[in-house]
Amino acid sequence: MHNDLPARIADLLGIDDVGADDNLIELGMDSITMMRLAGAWRKEGVDVKFADLVASPTLGAWQSLLGATTANDVRRVDVDETAPFPLALMQHAYWVGRAPGQQLGGVAAHFYHEFDGENVDPERLERAVRAVIARHGMLRVRILDDGTQVIGEDRWPGLTVHRDSDVDELRKMLSHRNMDIANGEVFDVQLSLLGDGRTRVHVNLDMIAADALSLRGLLGDLARAYRGEQLRPLDYSFPRYLAERSHTADEKDVEYWRQRLAGLPGAPELPVTGADTAVVLRRHRWLAPDEVRALETNAARHGLTPAMALAAVFAETLTAWSAEPRFLLNLPLFDREPLHADVDELVGDFTSSILLAWEGGLPGTFAERARRLQDQFHADVAHSAYSGVEVLRDLSRLHGERVLAPVVYTSALGLGELFSEEVRDCFGEASWIISQGPQVWLDAQVTELNGGLLVNWDIREDAFTPGVPDAMFNAYAGLLDWLLVTPEAWTTPVPALLPVEQREIRSEVNNTAVHREPRGLHDPFFAQAAWTPDAPALLSDGVVSYGELADQAKRIAGHLRQQGVQPGDLVAIDLPKGPEQVVAVLGVLAAGAAYLPLGTQPQARKDRILATAGVAHVLTELVFGDPIDPVTGGDLAYVLYTSGSTGEPKGVEITHSAAANTIDDLNERFAIGPGDRTLALSALEFDLSVYDMFGPLAVGGAVVCVRDTGHRDASKWVELLLRHRATVLNCVPALLDMVLTVAEEELPLRLVLLGGDWVTTDLPGRLWERAPGCTFAGLGGTTETAIHSTVCEVVTVDPQWTSVPYGVPLGNVRCRVVDALGRDCPDHVPGELWIGGAGVARGYRGDPERTAAKFTDGWYRTGDRARYWPDGTLEFLGRADHQVKIRGHRIELGEIEAALTSHPAVQGGVVVVTAEGRLAAAVTGDSDGVLGFLRDRLPSAMVPDTVTVLPELPLTPNGKIDRKRLATELRGTAPKHLTRPATETERLVAAVWSDLLNVGEVGREHDFFALGGDSLLATRLIVRLREAGLDGMSLSALFANPVLKDFAATLATGGTTAPWQLNAAPDQRHEPFPPTDVQRAYWLGRDESFTLGGVGCHFYREYEVAGLDVERLENAVNALIARHEMLRAVFDENGDQRILDSVPRFEVQRGFTRETQSRKVFDPAQWPLFSVAVDGDRVAIGIDNLILDALSILIFYAELGTLYDRPDTELPPIGVSFRDYVLSLPEPSSQDYWNELELPPAPKLPLAKDPADVTPVFSRRAAHVDSGRWKSVVERAREHGLTPSAVLMAAFAEVLGRWSGRNDLTLNVTLFDRAEVHPDITRVMGDFTSLLLVACGEGETWLDRAKFAHERLWQAIDHRDVSAVQVMRSLPEGMPVVFTSALGVGVEQPSSLFDRQVWGVSQTPQVWLDHQVTESAGGVELNWDAVDELFPDGVLDDMFAAYLSLVDHLATGDWAEIPDLLPSSQRQVRERVNATDGPVPDRALHADFFRRAQQTPDRVAVEWDGGRLTYGELADRALRTAAAIGPGEEPVAVSLPKGPDQIVAVLGVLAAGRAYVPIGVDQPPARRERMLRGIGQVITELDLGAEPAELVHAHPDSLAYVIFTSGSTGEPKGVEITHRAALNTIDDINEKFGVTEDDRVLAVSALDFDLSVYDIFGLLSAGGTVVTITEDERRDAQRWHELVERFGVTVWNTVPALAEMLSIVGDTKLRLVLVSGDWVGLDLPERFPQARFVAMGGATEASIWSNYVELKSPEPGWRSIPYGTPLRNQRFRVVDGAGRDCPDWVAGELWIGGTGVARGYRNDPERTAEKFAGGWYRTGDLGRYWPDGTLEFLGRADQQVKIRGHRVELGEVEAALLASPGVTQAVAAVAQGRLVAAVTGSEVDPAVVAGRLPAHMIPDHVELLDEIPLSANGKVDRTAVATLVTPCTEVAAPQGELEAEIAALWADLLGLNEVGRNQNFFTLGGDSLKATRFVEVLRGKHGPIVSLRSFFAAPTVAAVAEVLDADVEEGAI
């Protein structure tokens, strides 16, 4: 045999001659060829194995092998090929791996190919597929649930032919198909007819049935069969092959891998997201034949096979993107034992695998590294009998958790062309190819194709950080191209594979060149001392000036010179911390020397430093000599010693220029100047001290020196900081943490610089709480690079940050992130941070060896780990030496610490590795729940074994965490505690685990997989537990609950008993029977007379069924009708239901339109109550839920599919009926529970239309949650004790609550509730649905609310015998939002008839929105069916998107904190409309008036009927009034009637530097008295006798005025407004609307109403004129009109009602109309056609106005004029009860922020704190945003109401009523727009009430009641009060014609049926506006007889008639 061997091998290699000792691999022999040779020789009877050939790959060795081996006897075995047989090893891995519960599972091992050809004939193709399936048993295999497989009958449903299909959608569906392998679906061929004869053949193959070589064979068979060839039957089978092959590895193979196990690396550490989606995308590159030849030639030249050369290209690419250069590749092997002549033609999975280790950290050329990989492969493949699957299992056992190898390299070189010529001739060229597999991120494949090579990557796209797959593949292709065209590339190290665009960004952020003049570190200080010698330089116990400090430093320099110190020497400083250190440092530098601080370190360390540092002198005290002039400039500035890894300290030499570069950059960047003071916390030997000193001293600032007291006393630091008003703090994060922990008051800091350690994300927020507006900058760097090198100024903390990033380089600094070989790492990839540029040190003093190791070509190698982000930001990842390996996992301690410190109870946290090799955490704060918190966020390998609480974390002298000390302190802390199994089930499970896994004692906390379990052992476990008598086991349950106690809890040992007795009555089954409550609701609800009626409860779906046989479908439907009674049900006129004895044959409807079919409303009296229609291959099924619930519909589909596929199937009998069930239902017993339960309202979603006006048409929004994300949700739900349904319900409620403006709401929940009272009950069809009302929304966090909803759901389920339909009858409103979860309501679907749903919708009467959840493909379908017409455009889309984002967060994020659900687009609009920043006034409210009085004293300032005052006169009177008032701090009250004196008084108060408090002259005495508490001066008349006072220029932030508003407690609230706040509004209005000296305003508003502020100061600031009225003209519109016309008034500023009164009287020439303070009627703008009309809103508490809208006429659809948008420097929020921003259209409370916000309420800190928070005023008004950012006002939110334009606090009215003797209770309410009240006890004394309330606050009617009505929850029922208190006294009828006429006018105006002669116009609901209209009507009929003033005085019918009658009589005389 071996004689022809040389020629045979030479022929295979394509060369002429082969030497006996030539390495055949180097000559091009690949592994697949060797496998084939070994197989061929074994087939010839020689026992030689592939491993033998690989071990000695020479001709001579092989000849010896062939001569020495013995005959190979094949072991023949009897095999029953129809019986189940075990899965092969790789098959088993595929089977288990595809399970949804598996890591990277939920996906099949799947080939998918498309061939584009012409004229493929469907019939021939179908016959060919049948022939191939008949030939290959493995194409008929079914995988059973016990992990075995069986070959059965052909179950292929036939050829699916697609016509006019969406080819992209079809590819999307087929390419990621998860075939039903349990049902024999492993191979499928489909055909698309594309038109013009073009065809596409789709091939799906599950790899569990066939490997890559099998694919080639079966495609060849398919082509031959298509051509009409007869396929030869095979004489051998895959089950026989598995039985006969030797499948156990030799002991030497096992031992080989056992020896290698501990040293094997892990998977490549690529930038992955953790997403578990199963979407795979392909990237490919085809090498043309000439390129392949170039590859083969170059590879052979370097002794490489093409396959291993390509593997090395792949590995090199992975190395560039892997955080760890050592990693495993997973290599499949195609190795068939030649046990029979037909083995090569078999279809089956013959693959095995090896795990190949790549050593990417070792240097070398490409060829050298590739050779190492090839050598390793040959060493490993020689032991491949022990599969990679088995090695992975061993690794999992070794490391205590499951280990994966998710990066695969598949070489099919040597297997021949992927698609033979005959395949391409028959079916066309391959146009699309993809594969995917479980537990795989990335599979790189090399295949022979079209004479060349196809190199492709199949990637789980979403598993990787976006952009990474493309960048990796492009780099791979680029490296491959370089090797193909550049022979020298093979002998060159592979360069950095950094993408060009990333390189450009790095170049840009590192382009930091800035010109700076060289200088000495100390030079600016001495220059500053010469300029400002008296300025403070050092602040401590005393103050040291610049001059004093310079003098002391010069004298220290003189002393050093006397001691022989020369320029360039090194002087050590050994002084305690304090000002003396600064003097010493400056003295050393002035002498031209460099300083070396020794500090507080141990003496032995000081001695080691001094012994090696070459110190010329040691300063241990300040000794002064004669002063010398400072030496300027210099080279070495200081030497700082840092810790060395050898134990020897390293002296870092920093030059003057290096340190000065950093200091100058920071000073310029943050504008450090003479006003800054730095708190110097850092020790002198820590380099942050360099900036503490030289930062401020370089620019004239001061250093606040901290003395060393021997311990860190943060309270002392804070005391110093406050005392000296320090503005800058530069320190390590731990010290800031300490400062913030002890600080109790606002800090004066304006800048905080943090460096030297990891900056946690909590620090910025905590700082801003104590120092609002303070700049926060995180700085990165090292001692070796001059203090700091990078900067990140934090404005907001990104929630994705784990710490504050390093940011970008400082000026003249550059940064790189490099791998182990010094190559730049791509974005997202961790590497070592290198820093270059001006800051780099000279090196380590006296240590050239360590200098050379760390300083290279101008770069310092930091030893820190970092990575670049795509925008060029650097992220710090911790020290390389903080990266540890625990149980084989590389762990970044910083990542654990970031998670640890994010726990709300943890103040500080550090993780270390103890001497025992365990992870231990130390925290300050509280450790309760921390471990569970970490398990939610970290892989199990990263969860510390212990968490220890310490009073404080130990720090090094430099303020960093002392990790060494911690590791010692935490050594030996107790490990995780295990407990013994507690129940019989747990003991049984533990025993089986112990035996199976070969471990000792098993505890309740043990994890099956951590103990070494794998999928194969899991399968055996299930079988063992079944044999032991347990039930309920499943692999998915074990994967979901791997901990013993959790898994045991899922198991059962017995059945359950029926909850109640069912009485079957088959003989009465055609008698009528009542509907259930839900059925009756469905039956009634379809009536069009009901709101949202006119629709049935209709479940509608459409399916695509390829090759649909309509007749067969019709027969199946009729068989189903005969089987199920409820498919023959109808309902009579009473709603009772009846089963028809017989029905006509059902005929499937041919042809349909979706619109008609989906909206069908069935007539319940007419059979059938379902529909089946077809159109082509489309099937539409509609079912009325009156007859079937969701489970019944699933049964309908399952059985219909079975009867369609196999018409002769006998389905199991059903021995019970729905009628029996309904009539046997027990009497409800839970009525008391529901009667006593108080439910919140239904969701108050924003509506666009009244539901009564809408005919419901439902549309669907749908999404799919993939299995990976769903599994995560399920697992987290389980951890929190929640069911998945409850979690989704709570998430739904969260979204509803956000769009309802309140969390508390009630959901209508569908329950599929069929009691298991009969063995057949699950097969019965009917509507078993019940409805539950579930309260949601209570709790602080989302998790709290989810637990509350879960608890309420289960309480409702416990009381479900009373239907929600009954409960709702007693509720005031319906519950139109429904949640329907069908999780767990599964029915096996044995048929594929309905596996392709293409559309669906459901509809239900009286429902707005129904959310349905169903299981699908291991995940869930989320459907929202809603009546779109009800809602504003976009609301449902925004809600659904928010819901999906929340569900997504629940899969990946923290459940305690959920993301803000406000749509980002809405947030952007809000930010835009609230971006109102502009100039902020910096002067007093009265400043402009007095300036104008000086400039234009003769202009008219105030005018009235009978007089005027010029600016000069008004100023003179004001200053005389100021003199009379005198100086002081207290406000001054002004209580004068309307007129010019009011204005004089107000200006006088302000001119005296005081604030004014307006008190109306009509205020009741008691209320007036309360307002005047604490006010000593009240102006009731002017005193102008004094000489004019000097004008006081008040500070803009001082108080300007106090206006009292109604208070809810009965106490008026005094609103304090500053000058700046009021003037901000006035300036904006004047600028916006062009108010100038030519303008005049009629000052109608009372002084105590804040519109008066604008009347006075708006016009006087602009140089205009204020026209005043008298007190009794305040409501006389005729008088106003007269004054407007006479004085040429141009500006009108009042509440809307007064403006309307003016417009009724007559037209005006106003140019500007400002209305505010109440609703603005839609017709009001058009009443002032010539004027600019501006509606405004706001609050007294926000300085007059805060928003505006200018318009000519309203837009269609407006209910009132909206608020509009904010004024300058003002902001608005609309928030719900939880303080969250409400989405568009959702009503919430208006919050006003910005410059106009008041200081608070005078002397009322409690109410101030309640209403003013974080710079916002909570108005108590309701409003909402429109999508364009417009604000709409919706009224008051609380009991503060508006009556006739006045804001009235009902509580103040009630307090006045209670002051009346005998009144025990009082409640005020509004009825029909009038103020009414009810009291108990005794009648109200009107005089008491009138003495306490102004007229507008006195109730129109007060009723004495026996008791105050209460609501169900015990609150006062104001609605009932309003109803009860409506006056019903007898009315005296009008007398005479005049009274009758007047009464008729009133009735018409007020909308009343009758009016009495003595009834009060205003008590009946009249107001000023209606009074004006009435008087105008009288004027038209009778002339100007009745004035408004007289009418207000006597507003009764009789009084008005008397006035009219008297005038008539007088005229007659």
Image (spheres, rainbow, N blue to C red):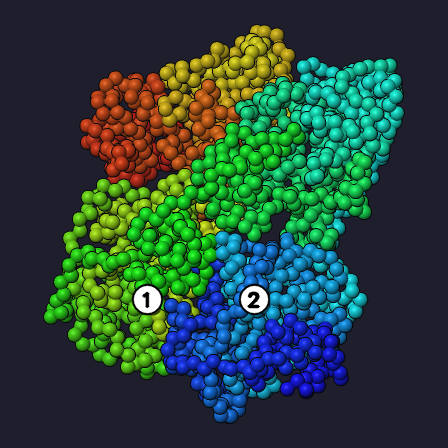
Relative to residue 1703, is residue 1598 drawn left or right? right
The image position of residue 1505, as x and y in percent, is 51, 22
Observer able to see residue 312: no
Q: How far across and down, in percent of the image, does residue 332 sit?
A: 57, 70
Front residue (pair 323, 1020): 1020
| Mark carried by residue 782 | none
In the rendered image, the vertical position of residue 1877 relative to residue 1068, given as above or below: above
Occupied quadrant, residue 1931: top left
- Quadrant in the picture for the C terminus: top left
**Where is residue 791 drawn, in percent x and y?**
69, 39
- Pick the front one: 437 or 979: 979
The residue depicted at 23 percent of the width and 45 percent of the height is: 1234
- Name above or below for residue 1083 compared with residue 1684: below
Residue position for label 2? 252
**Disc on the earlier residue, 2 or 1:** 2
Tell me the kind of residue under disc 1. Answer: Val
Q: What residue lies at 46% left-to-right and 22% top-to-bottom?
A: 1805
**Would you name the residue on which mark 1 appears?**
1387
Which secondary structure, mark 1? loop
**Farthest left residue in view:** 1067
